[in-house]
Image (tube, rainbow, N blue to C red):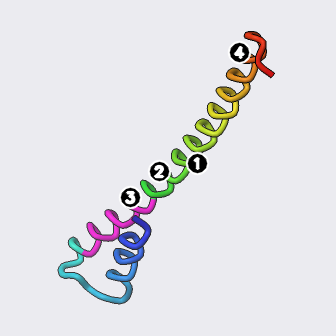
Amino acid sequence: MGAVAKSLENLGKGKQLGTARLDAACKGFEDHWHGGIGRMAKLAHGLREGLDATLKNYGENEQGTAKGFGAT
């Protein structure tokens, strides 16, 4: 996704893609694309942290259950 965003950014640098209206539309799309990628990165980071916490809690729960059944 980052490569596509970079391509979009490079596409519009100093180049006219067509009419001023088309150039503005492409710039608007690029801005939204970059914003979307930023939000996705934050969500992915939060998901990773949540999964790490879940894994840790699951392991602790398994150890507690095993100890409860007399495992060493």
User: Of the residues tagged 4 and 3, which is closer to the observer?
Assistant: 4
Residue 40 located left or right of residue 12: right
Residue position for label 2: 40
Q: Earlier in the sequence, mark 1 or mark 4?
A: 1
- Describe the element under mark 4 as helix, strand or loop: helix
Quarter of the image with the N terminus in it? bottom left
Q: Position of residue 7 (x, y in %)?
A: 36, 77
Residue position for label 4: 65
Question: In the figure, 51 relative to 3: above or below?
Answer: above
- Check residue 36 for magenta coloring: no
Residue position for label 1: 45
Q: Amino acid at mark 2?
A: Met
- Check residue 26 for magenta coloring: yes
Q: Amino acid at mark 1?
A: His
Instruction: Tell me the chief SS of the magenta region.
Output: helix
Q: Which span is picked out in magenta?
A: 23-34
Residue at the far top in the pictured view: 69
- Describe the element under mark 1 as helix, strand or loop: helix
Q: Answer whether labels 4 and 3 touch (C-beta < 8 Å).
A: no
Seen at 18% across and 79% down, the residue is 19
Residue position for label 3: 32
Inter-mark Cα distance, 4 to 2: 37 Å
